[in-house]
Amino acid sequence: MVSSGLRHALKGTCAPTAVVDLDAFDANLDALAERARGLPIRLATKSLRVPAAIDRALAHPAFSGVLAFSVPEALYLHARGVRDIVIGYPSLDRASLSRMFAEAGACENITVMIDSVDHLDIIEQARTTIAEAGAASVRVCIDVDSSYRPAESWLGDRVHIGGRRSPIRDARSAVTLARQVAARPGFDLVGLMFYEGQIAGTADAGRSVRQAIVRAMQKASIAELAERRAAVIAAVREIADLEFINGGGTGSFESSSVEGTLTELAAGSGLFSPGLFDGYTHFRHRPAAYFVSPVVRRPAPGWVTVFKGGYIASGVPGPDRLPTIAWPQGLAYSSLEGPGEVQTPLTGPGAESLRIGDLVWFRHAKAGELAEHFNEFQIVSQGRISDAWTTYRGEGLVL
């Protein structure tokens, strides 16, 4: 439910526009800190994509360092003064890797992600193009697959639950790659990353048979991953003096924080608390990011049409990828149109009270993707617009 204070603050605002409830954002910072149980939180910047929001999160004592999603983003953040940057995904962007080697201090503060020898080769090729990079040491993190495979010893990967990420899965494959890193001059293995998406990114609330199966899967996955993760870490520590072991996500803090293997957690989506987060049983953050769009038509009794609204989230296509209609209550999408590129028809009891120009409030299904549609967020605190935060898009960044 959108508070009357938020609605009043945006009254008369040119729309569509994106909105951040700053009081909710700050409350979510504290909530994540409490759920982390003392472990530092590395901020997943792809889940915000708003420089001022990133700065505000990093100013909180529970947050330390960032998990960027590309080399250009890492360089952008480094130029803004952010330090301790881990790039969460392997990169084949040779031009940007070369820029990293050419930029003063970047190699000391940015850690690149790998999961194969091919990644090492590409990074090394980029380094050879920069004369000044000869003495630069490359900080490397290995991404270890954390998905769940029931009865893996019998079925192999025929039943795979979770993201298709790294081929590195067990102690043997991790050690093989770690030795390759250690054998290359100028490469330092400093970290391991584990992302348990089947726990952190999968909603478990509900009484359906499917949701009961999800909860059982997650319980089994938590136990399996704890054992496998401990074995991988112990084996790799025999080869490298690791600085950090990263894992978890907003949806898995309860299990990840108490496992005892991690030195830090990763999170970002929980600060905006998008629509997909309504489906978790073990935590509840305050919705903090919205977009609003005006009613531009009343095409028939019981119907209104708002401008734009077709901001569909990535992932497996389905109803849960649509924006959540946050206010007024009692509205639903048209089964024939859904949220559209230029218009979104809505129907239901909530339509009766709406007039031309009234604002309808929505929440994106995922956190950072909302910033790809707007140049800035209107910041509301204590019932009034207090600021405007530019997004990456508003900065002209395509990352």
Image: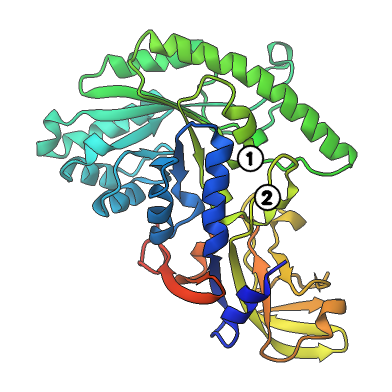
Q: Secondary structure at mark 2?
A: helix
Residue 362: % across, % down = 67, 69
Q: Which residue is mark 1?
A: 251
Assess whether mark 2 and mark 1 are in contact (beta carbons under 8 angstroms): yes
| Residue at point 68%, 52% (across, down) | 276
Depth check, front residue: 270 or 308: 270
Amino acid of disc 1: Gly
- Does residue 334 lie above or below 238 as drawn? below
**Label 1 – label 2 distance at C-alpha:** 8 Å
Q: Secondary structure at mark 1?
A: helix
Left/right placement of residue 213 relative to residue 373 reads right
Left/right placement of residue 75 relative to residue 127 reads right
The tag earlier along the polypeptide, 1 or 2, is 1
Depth check, front residue: 185 or 5: 5
| Residue at point 73%, 83% (across, down) | 305
| Residue at point 39%, 48% (across, down) | 58
Residue 177: % across, % down = 40, 17
Mark 2 neighbour density, 10 Å: few (under 14) some (14–19) many (20 or more) = many
- Does residue 236 lie above or below 13 as drawn? above
Q: Which residue is mark 2?
A: 277
Amino acid of disc 2: Phe
